[in-house]
Structures are given as structure tokens and as C-alpha cells.
Amino acid sequence: MDLVLVNLIDGLVTGLLLFMLSAGLTLIFSMMGVLNFAHASFYMLGAYFAYQISLALGFWMGLIFAPLIVGVIGAGVERYGLRRVHQYGHVPELIFTFGLALLIEELVQFIWGRNQMPYQIPDILNFTAFAISGNSIPAYKVFMIFISIAIFIGLLYVLTKTRVGMIIQAALSYPRTVEALGHNVPLIFMGVFGVGTALAGVAGVIAGPVLGTFPGMAFVLGSIVFVTIVIGGLGSLWGALVASLLIGWITTFAKSYNIRMENILNSVGISTPENLSDSAFRDIWAMTSPQIADILPYILMVLILIFRPYGLFGNREA
Amino acid sequence: MRKSIKLGLGAALALSVSTAAVMAENVKIAFIDPLSGGFAATGINGLHQFEFAAETLVNAKGGVLEGDMFEILPFDNKVSPKESLIQLQVAIDQGARYIVQGNSSGVANALTEAIDKHNRRNPDSRVLFLNYSAVDPALTNEKCNFWHFRFDPHADMKMAALTDMMAENQDIKKVYVIGQDYSFGKAVADAAVSMLAEKRPDVEVVGNELHPIGKVKDFTPYARKIVSSGADAVITGNWGADMLGLGKSILENGFEGPIYTYYAAADGITAAFGESGVDSLYLIAEGDDNPAPKPETQEYIKAFKAKYPDGNMSQTRITNVIQMLAQAIEEAGTATDVVQVANALEGMTFTDSLWSTEEMVMREQDHQLIQDIHVYGHQPMEAPYDMDNSGYGLKVQFTVENASADIETTCDMQRP
């Protein structure tokens, strides 16, 4: 029972981190129709910039400035890269962001090398907040939870309660009408892209010390972020949040408990074949939940696409 | 104008031919390991250690056979067995007679098979395989051949040393074994379980699990399982980002016992653990204590760090490879007839290692180098003997002399 609580907290941390990445991506995707393959690369840039800044000015300055720099770079990419490619259609845009992801990874390796960076948790947060029957919850995780929730509330407020938010929402659905009303839609696009990448930067800053700051960090998270926004529904902030938490909890629980396929099959009435080692389905029988934990979100995505193509909270088809 | 271009080309061609003629005297050693991609850091650091060893320990002392110099030819295999076989062919075509490789036993298995075949079919261009790091026991057991020599103790030998240490530590009652889901991870787990059962039947293995290799983003759930299993010690063969992620997660989530590893040092790992790894992280390897006891070894390390300030002297066996090869070539009196060199290497007693005052023996029946194995602890260490310039490094905690000198082998060596 205690472990359930611990896993709930761990899953929450994983989920909220995923949310910060997918929130920006889902806004960008739904507004511009661009699958931004480089999104996770901005997450990586956030971690590396924060590490570099933290060497000189400490962790907190990194937390403030790294996302700003990443956001400005993101806005620049939209203004001088994507906007020009946009006129040629979606495929060139896709290829552009894909190339950008490769370019950023190579650049990072060129500047910082291929080793893992010693980006550390700040001393002030490097203690055990509390322990549940021997399982300690580091204070840093609590800090991660609070930062992500604050960002979610902030985003929700801006999008639903402010004038800027209303224009963004309108531009999401009817960009031409909004433009006809005299709003500068390209500027909105640039702003959304900048904020979206800055959010990815924040995620990088706070995830870097725990998940590791290395050139492969973007690749590891890259595909799962797309899964999240497809499950949640394109353009939906709530969808991104729910899908992120769902994925966080599913993978955490699947890894924490060694549920054997054999037990599941037995419980639904299929008995174990006598010569298991000769059976053609041997691999399926021997499967355990930690082994398949990382593909569960993909299975979920396929099911969602079949039964609810617009996602959990979305209102248009993926 | 056109004439001058032709002239220039001709001159360039002549120059390249003449340099090739000069180079022909060199003993070419092909280094086939990852130089790009995710494991490039390890590969490039290894390449630097080879180049430095060849330069300092052989060429600066006049080379072998009165003036032949060692030349290291780097080849990037991207840790892919397929790519390695292509590079092997290129290396042989370029005149390399010695192949060194270490990262990944999968690659080593492919190479040793291909080299065995090549040597049978092409007696004129035979090559030797000097394996400096691939530790799958099979390479000196069922898959052994006359052309393969291993300078690193294999996984079972390392586990034997580790379990010798655990046999003396009565505080350890419960052990958790975790590793990457592939041949090496499984070999480590099997060895741990069987050797613990033999040396410490009272120890309970409370967890034995494999995780997907290179795909785990967050090791927290695994760490939770380890902590809640009540384990006193963890054994893992993980390397790279998987080692760092697992180790950090275990320590952050409240585990206090020792973590016994094969590869938790260098390439950024030592720096990333920093203070948190002290008295928790252990590593089994060959080599010597830090600071190195021999003065010439200290000089060697200082010179290496002066040339490669960001490098690590992390694979001490590399100097043994270079020195033993040089000694074998001298004894054989030839660098081109690799059968004679292999005969000299087989059963060789090597006394000049930088890392030991004891003699090392290249065991005749399976071509496995027998040497001391140490269990190191992650401890504060002054430069230049630290790793990653972090102020932390490896300190010997426990030593098995001539470790596993009589370990059984199933090798049935076919000699030419």
C-alpha cells in the first residue's frame, strides 16, 4: 500500500515533466499544423544552457535565463526558418524540423562533447523531503511537481482568461478570420512557437539534473511526446495534462510491479502449455510488465486512434 | 595552366606513393571501435590511449625490430557488428595485421568469427585479434580460436573476484541483481546467482531483473523495487547512460548499501556521481591502485593528461596490449608472420606492465590474460589520478591476485 503512494508520486513527476514538453508541442501542432520534430531538441538545449549558466551563476539563474534563451531561439527559428518554408507546404516543414533536430544534436555534441554533463541538483534542494516506509522522496521531486503545476495554471489562465489567450484560441481554429479582424497572425504564431519551445526549455532545466544531461536526451523523449499529444487530443491543454499523467502512471506502475503475462493469461482461463520451451508463444508467456512498460503508451495511442481519433479531449481529427 | 595542374597532380601522386613506401615499414594496428554516435566518448578515449601507448612505450623507444614503428589506424564501426566486418576488410586491405577492438561483445563475436574464416582462406594476409575489453566468456570458451587474445578479465572472472569479496562481508544478506536485457547483462546475472549460491549459500537473491537496454528514461520505479526488496547490496553490469541513470536513481531514492558495478567510472560517469557515489559505488577491474605506485606509471599518466586534458586513463589494459605485442614481435623476429607472433604471445609471461609488479600470463589453452583483479571504490582523488577531472577516482578496496588463473575453459584450440 505504501508503495502505491510512492508510485503515485513518481508517476506524477514523470507525467508533469511530460506535460511541460507536450503542452508547447500541442499548441504549436494545432495552430500551425507543424509536427515539430525538433521540440525535444529544445528540451535538450534548455538543459545544456542551464548547466552552462549554473556553472557561473548558479542553478536559479539557469532556471530563469535558459528557458528565455531557448524561447528566443525558438521564435527565431519560426521567424526566419519555418515561416519561409511554410509556403511550400507541410512536408518541407516536417523535413525542416527533422533536420533541425539532427543539427541541434550535432551542435550540442560539438560544443559540449559526447559525455554526460555533471549538472547537479542545487544543494538547497538536495535533501530528502520525506520518506514512506524507507522509500525517500527527494525534495527536488516536490520542487518539480510545484513548478509544473504552477506553469499549468499560468498557461490555463493566459489561454482562457486573457485577451491574448482568446486571440490565440481564435487563431487556432480560424486563422483567416482573425487575420481579417486586423490581428497579426504571424506574430501570434511566432509568439506561440517561442513560448512552446521555452516551456520545453523549462522541462529541460529541471529534468537535466535527474534524468541526465547528455546528447541522447532528446532522442529518448522525442517520440513519447508525440504519443502524448495524440492521446490527449491536438490543441487541448487539458488533454495534454491528462495524457501525460496517464502515461506517467501507466509506465511507473508497470515497471514497479512484476506482473507476469502467465498470471494474466491464467486468470482469464488459459492454462500454461506443458512444454513451454517448445511452445511457439513462449516469448509471450514469459513476458513481464517492466519489459513492456515502455511500449504501453504506444499501444494506448493505437487504441485511441482506432476508437477516438480526435483524442481524449480534442475536437478535431489527428 | 593545365600543364601546371598536371604537374602538381603528378607531384602529389609521387609524394603519396613515396610516403606509402616509407609507411610500409610500420606495424599497422587497426583500431575498430565506435568513433561516432552514442558510444563515441568511450571509443575516442580508447583510441587516444592506444595512440599514446604506441607513441610513448614503443615508438619513442626506437620501435620494434630495429626501427619499425607502431601505427594505429582508426576505424569507426558505430558499435555495429555488420559495420565492423566492412571495416575489418578495409583494415586488412590497408595492410593491418593486428586488429584491436573492445566495445561490445556482439562486435567481438562477429570479428573473431570473421577473422578465423579470413585467416583460413588467406594465409598470406592473416591477422591477429587483440581484444582489449569485450568480456563475454564465450570468446575464450566455446568460441575461442588461435587468432583471438583477450587482455581484460572476462565477466565470470570479474564476478568470481567480486563474490570472493562478498564472501568475506557478512553484513550482506540480501542481494539485488539488475542488468541490461542482452547477452552480457544475462551473463552477469547468471554468474552472480550461481557464484553467490556457491560461496555464500546464506545470501538471498531478492531480485534478478533485466531492463531494456538504452531505452529507460527514468530508473525511479526500478530503484523503488530495489529499496523495498530490503536488499543490502546491488550488482549490475550496466554501462553508459544506463549505469548512471540506475546508480543515481538508486542513491537518490534512499538506498544505502554498496552498488557493485563493472563500468561505473570515467566518460562523465565519475563526475556525474561526484560526492553521492562515495562509499556506495564499487567497480571490478584489472589495473592498479591510484595514485599509481610505480613512479614510471605516474609519469606516464601525467604525460597522458598533459596531452589529453579531458581524457581518462580508464583502460589500463591498453598499455599491456601494446607492450605485449611489441614483446611478441621482438621474440618472433617478425611483424608480418602473425602465426609466429601468436606463438610468442601464447603462454607469454609479461613482467613489464605499468600496472603490476607481478607477472601476467597469457594462458595457453584459451588466450586469456591472467592478472590481478581489484574491487575499486569511488573515492575522492587528487589530480591527475582522478577521473573526468572531477576530484573523484578509483581506490583499490580488495584484490584477488592472479585472479581465476585456473578457471575452467571449454576452449578446444585449433592451431595452424
Image: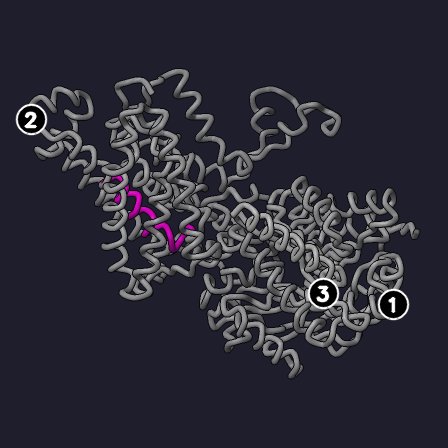
Q: Is residue A175 above or below residue B138?
A: above
Residue B206 appears in the figure? no
Q: Which mark is residue A182?
A: 2
Do circles 2 and 3 both sit on a common chain?
Answer: no
**Percent from the top left, x then y, of residue A254?**
48, 36
Foreground mark, 2 or 3, reads 3
Q: Position of residue A3 (x, y in %)?
A: 44, 45
Residue on which the image places disc 3: B70
Q: Which mark is residue B333?
A: 1
What type is the residue that disc 2 sits on? Gly
Magenta span has A200?
yes
> In the shown orientation, is residue A121 left or right of residue A187?
right
* Magenta-highlighted residues: A195-211
Residue B408 percent coordinates (x, y): 84, 56
Front position in the image: B31 or B317: B31
Circles 2 and 1 on the same chain:
no
Q: Secondary structure at mark 2?
A: loop
Give the quarter of the image for residue A209.
bottom left
Residue furthest out toward the top: A307
C-beta proximity under 8 Å, tags 2 and 1: no
Chain of the residue under the numbered disc 2 shown in the image? A
The chain identifier of the residue carrying mark 1 reads B
For disc 3, the chain is B
Badge 3 density bin: few <14, some 14–19, many ≥20, Cα 10 Å = many
Amino acid type, mark 3 = Phe
- Mark in the foreground, 2 or 1: 1
